[in-house]
Every structure is written in structure tokens, then in C-alpha cells.
Image (cartoon, helix red, strand yellow):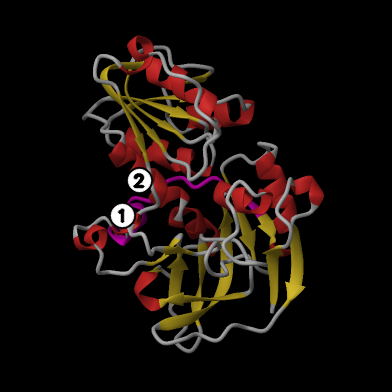
């Protein structure tokens, strides 16, 4: 089979990805072999390729938004970021498996969906419908699920005012979920195309900064410099959730301007399978508008380069030929 692997992490211009031929993997006990139909391209994949996330094993195939068919049964499934947990630690026992110290991740601890086949634990894949194109399902598996958890973590009140910083794959799905719940959404992004998309999807504003105080906010852009102004834009008692796995350094905070009046700063760490099941049930019952930028499998390096250069509007997806 063909697979894209991270050889020497570094800037995309240095060519950290290589297309290789390797044997089709063999599933172990409790695992399934999945023939990949499409795989979303996530900023986490970019962080792995460029070295912002330290590789956990050599020559790993990225990709954790894979849609495919289980060999032998033909069942369509989704393979997402969370690959396994211990199931016995105190975090797993209290429903916080996303914090399990022994958790492993697709496309980081094991080969992911930038390949024609992958193996995954059967207890961690999600059943998916046959009547939706694979490329439209793929972004739901991380962009959708993580956005769903971030929306919960930011404590948005009913009918509240939500700020979204950065407007890529996850943000454009999260904005729709918040608007459907009755929120007023303000988007802060530099990209003219992303501003247009935000307004088309129902955002009240899209510009450099929100025009009114916010009850809640989510930072999707991996830019620590945005944390102080995002906190300052919160109304009293507001919460800022940081959705990414990687963030550049946060500048010094001024207590009075950024944290006083019971403003809250929270991180978002992966997701639980319960998050995934709840979001997918919601998204399949009430399908969001998924704006995709499809790339042929052979163009994985170009997809990540475009993502690095903020040239993807919506969600990039690799589509198998």
C-alpha cells in the first residue's frame, strides 16, 4: 500500500513528508483493518510534520479523521484522534478518559489515515452511514468533535455572545453548532475568504475583533499572542477555551485587564468517546454545512503546505482515487 510518512520534521518547505510503499498492516487482537476512503487534514497533522509536536515513533503516517470500510465486513467507520485508553485509571473511571496518562492517538502513536489502510482498536471506531460522501464525513471526526468539546468547555450561556478566534475546519463547524443553539457569534480572522464564509454561515460579525463584550470565546488559532486580547474581550464572568493541542507562548497577563472579574481561561485536551458519539449523533441528525477543500491522496504535502500558509477555506480532505 501507499502511505505518507513524516521523515524529518521541519517546515513544509523542507519536505518533511515522504510517500512510501509499505506492507498492508495486520490487525491485532481487538483491532480492525480499515481501507481508507478519505481523511481530513488537521492542523495537528501539520504540527507533527513540522515538529511542533515531537514524534513518538519514526516514520509515522499522520491523519486522524479517516473514513473507510472494515475489511471483511464492509462496514463504514470513522477513525478519530483518540486511539486507546487504559480504562482503569482514576481519570477513565470518572469519565475523563481524554486525560488518561496512558492514552494513545491516531497518527501520532500509531499510523493514521494518510495511508490506503490503517488498523484501529474496534472499541474506538465510530459507525458511520453509507449514504454520505466520505469526504464530507471526515472533518466531523476531529474538527467537529473537538469543536463540540471546546463549545462545552467555554460555558456559553443560552443565547450568549461567543467569540471565535481563527476560522478553519473546526471553527466553521463549531460556529454553526453555536448559532443553532441561539448564540450570537463573532469571528476574528485575518483571511478575507474566511470572513466571507463566517458571514455566510450566520456569524453576526467577522473582522479583527468582536464589536461587543463576549460571554464566551474559543481560540482555535495556535497563537499565544491572541490570549490576552481574547481574555480582555470577555465580559465579566466570561470563559476562554483554547482548543488546540499546540499553542505558541502566551505573553504576560495583566491581572486587572485579563483575569479579574472572574474571567476564566481553560484548555481543551483531546476528547472522550462520549463526546464523539454525542457530536456525531447531532451532526448526522442535523447535518452542518461542511465546507471542504478536497485534495487527491497524492497531494498530501500540498494540502499541509496550504494549511500552513492559511490558504485552506474550510476543511482540507485527502480523497482516495
Report the quarter where the N terminus lies.
bottom right
Residue farthest along the right direction in this orientation: 14
Closer to the camera, 258 or 276? 258
How packed is label 1: few (under 14 Cα within 10 Å), some, or many (20 or more)? some
| Structural distance between the alpha carbons of marks 2 and 1 | 7 Å
Residue 144, horizontal then vertical, whole percent: 42, 49
Residue 54 in percent (x, y) is at 59, 53
Does 74 sit above or below residue 235?
below
Q: Is residue 287 magenta?
A: yes
Q: Residue at x 62, y 27 (%)?
A: 191
* Total number of numbered discs in the rendering: 2
Q: Which residue is mark 2?
A: 148
- Toward which corner of the image does residue 104 lie, by quadrant? bottom left
Pointer 1: what residue?
275
x, y percent for residue 136: 51, 56
| Label 2 environment density (alpha carbons within 10 Å; few <14, some 14–19, many ≥20) | many
Q: Which residues are magenta?
A: 273-294
Is residue 157 found left or right of 272 in the rendered image?
Answer: left
Q: Which residue is pictured at 43% across the width and 40% down the height?
A: 243
State yes or no: discs 2 and 1 in contact (Cβ < 8 Å). yes
Of residues 237 and 126, the one nearer the viewer is 237
Q: Secondary structure at mark 1?
A: helix
Task: Specify the quadrant that holds the C terminus.
Answer: bottom right
| Residue 131 visible in the current orientation | no
User: Which residue is found at the position 67% from the left and 84% from the top?
Assistant: 23
Is residue 277 at all visible to an observer of this figure? yes
Does 64 lie within the magenta span? no
Front position in the image: 314 or 109: 109
Indicate which disc residue 305 carries.
none
Is residue 188 found left or right of 52 in the rendered image? left
Q: Give the residue drawn at x 68%, y 71%.
A: 3
Amino acid at each position: 500500500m501507499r502511505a505518507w510518512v513524516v521523515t524529518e520534521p521541519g517546515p513544509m518547505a523542507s519536505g518533511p513528508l515522504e510517500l512510501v510503499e509499505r506492507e498492508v498492516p495486520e490487525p491485532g487482537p481487538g483491532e480492525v483493518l480499515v481501507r481508507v476512503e478519505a481523511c481530513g487534514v488537521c492542523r495537528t497533522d501539520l504540527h507533527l510534520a513540522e515538529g511542533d509536536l515531537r514524534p513518538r515513533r519514526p516514520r509515522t503516517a499522520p491523519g486522524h479523521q479517516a473514513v473507510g470500510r472494515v475489511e471483511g465486513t464492509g462496514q463504514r467507520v470513522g477513525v478519530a484522534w483518540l486511539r486507546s485508553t487504559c480504562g482503569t485509571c482514576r481519570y477513565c473511571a470518572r469519565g475523563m478518559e481524554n486525560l488518561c496518562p496512558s492514552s494513545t492517538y491516531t497518527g501520532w502513536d500509531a499510523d493514521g489515515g494518510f495511508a490506503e489502510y490503517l488498523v484501529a482498536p474496534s472499541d474506538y471506531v465510530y459507525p458511520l452511514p453509507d449514504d454520505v460522501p466520505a469526504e464530507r464525513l471526515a472533518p466531523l471526526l476531529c474538527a467537529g468533535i473537538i469543536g463540540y468539546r471546546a463549545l462545552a468547555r467555554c460555558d456559553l450561556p443560552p443565547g450568549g455572545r461567543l467569540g471565535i478566534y481563527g476560522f478553519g475546519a473546526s471553527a466553521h463547524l463549531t460556529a454553526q453548532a453555536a448559532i443553532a443553539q441561539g448564540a450570537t457569534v463573532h469571528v476574528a480572522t485575518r483571511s478575507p475568504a474566511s470572513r466571507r464564509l463566517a458571514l455566510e454561515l450566520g456569524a453576526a460579525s467577522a473582522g479583527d475583533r468582536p464589536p461587543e463584550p463576549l460571554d464566551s470565546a474559543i481560540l482555535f488559532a495556535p497563537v499565544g499572542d491572541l490570549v490576552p486580547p481574547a481574555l480582555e474581550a470577555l465580559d465579566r464572568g466570561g470563559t476562554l477555551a483554547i482548543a488546540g493541542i499546540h499553542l505558541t507562548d502566551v505573553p504576560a497577563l495583566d491581572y486587572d485587564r485579563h483575569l479579574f472579574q472572574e474571567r476564566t481561561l481553560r484548555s481543551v485536551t483531546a476528547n472522550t468517546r462520549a463526546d464523539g458519539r454525542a457530536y456525531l449523533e447531532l451532526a448526522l441528525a442535523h447535518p452542518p454545512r461542511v465546507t471542504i477543500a478536497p485534495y487527491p491522496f497524492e497531494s498530501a504535502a500540498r494540502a499541509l503546505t496550504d494549511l500552513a500558509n492559511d490558504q485552506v477555506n474550510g476543511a482540507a480532505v485527502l480523497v482516495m482515487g
